[in-house]
Image: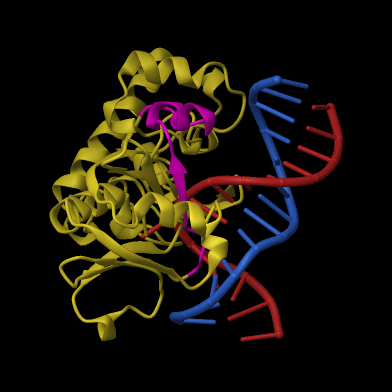
Chain colours: A yellow, B red, C blue
Amino acid sequence: MPELPEVHGYQQYVNSTILHKEILEMECRDERLLKRPIKAFKELLIGNQFTGTQRIGKYLFLETSNQTSLVMHFGMTGRPSYYKDAAQRPKFGHIVLSLVNDFQFAFENKRKFGWWDIAENIEEYRKEHGLSKDARSLSLEEFRENLSNRKTDIKKVIMDQSVCAGVGNWMADEILFQAQVHPEKKLADMDDQQVSNVYKALQDVIETAIDNDAHYDDFPKNYLIHHRKEGGSCPQTGASIQKIKVGGRSTYFSPEWQKK
DNA sequence: CACACTGTTCGCTC
DNA sequence: CGAGCGAACAGTGT
């Protein structure tokens, strides 16, 4: 599930559930989800509490009372879950924190592509991991800088987390649909106006998704997402939506509407 | 059985 | 060294 808007929602969820509550225990059922020895996480978390959060792209940072942050990445199938009764532990809640108020916090991760890490300093961590500033707070000028002179398809470029952190597969398709740009268009063949159209669509799609709590059914009628399947009907032209592979990912677009 | 999936990371080539 | 590319990772759903 999680691209930028979903992780934004997870951040709100964390903020309203587990901040400022002492962590008593940590249990992890599959340590492949941990980027460091479990001992390091326990030392950081047990007896401590979360004090705030930051989100950069799809990465969520949970700050603790001693500066160092817990880093969460949800992969393709992750979400947080807060519940009281241990019997309510979700089926895929592979990592669980027990809190002082008898509530539990589970990191659900069906497909196990998500992970936890530790960051001493969030800004340094961001740079070390090649993340741009969060797409939502990126200016047009910064967006242009991050594009530099990349040679590959525009879709691959905007999905690159060092260009505009937070964009994933469906958002990239939606952005390019709104900007009327073909996903295989090369940056070198785009003029300034087209680049700024992509930037504007990027911001619009993010805000629309957040306004609607990442609930796709509520997105505007003219969004591709309602028709994002092979043979779907383009909400602008009525033409048949086409499916291709770009950068190994399924890509949907409207042939006449999105020009190469 | 084959394939798809809203993501990242690794190893390889250029 | 960096960009680009394809495969790998793991599990579930159709």
* Quarter of the rendering containing residue A97: bottom left
Question: Can I make out residue A58 in this image?
Answer: no
Q: Quadrant of residue B1?
A: bottom right
Residue at 50% over, 57% down? A39
Say if residue A1 shows up in the picture. Answer: yes
Boundaries of the magenta span: A111-133
Pick the residue in front: A106 or A227. A106
User: Is A84 situated above or below A220?
Assistant: below
Q: Residue at x 30, y 50 (%)?
A: A7
* Residue A90 higher or lower than B14, as above or below: below
Where is residue A30 drawn, in percent x and y?
53, 70
User: Is A140 above or below relative to A238?
Assistant: above
In the image, residue A247 lies at what x, y percent? Answer: 60, 45
Identified at 29% across, 56% down, the residue is A47
Question: Quick one: quadrant of the N terminus of chain A?
Answer: bottom left
Q: Nearer the viewer, residue A6 or A181?
A: A6
* Residue A115 lies within the magenta run: yes
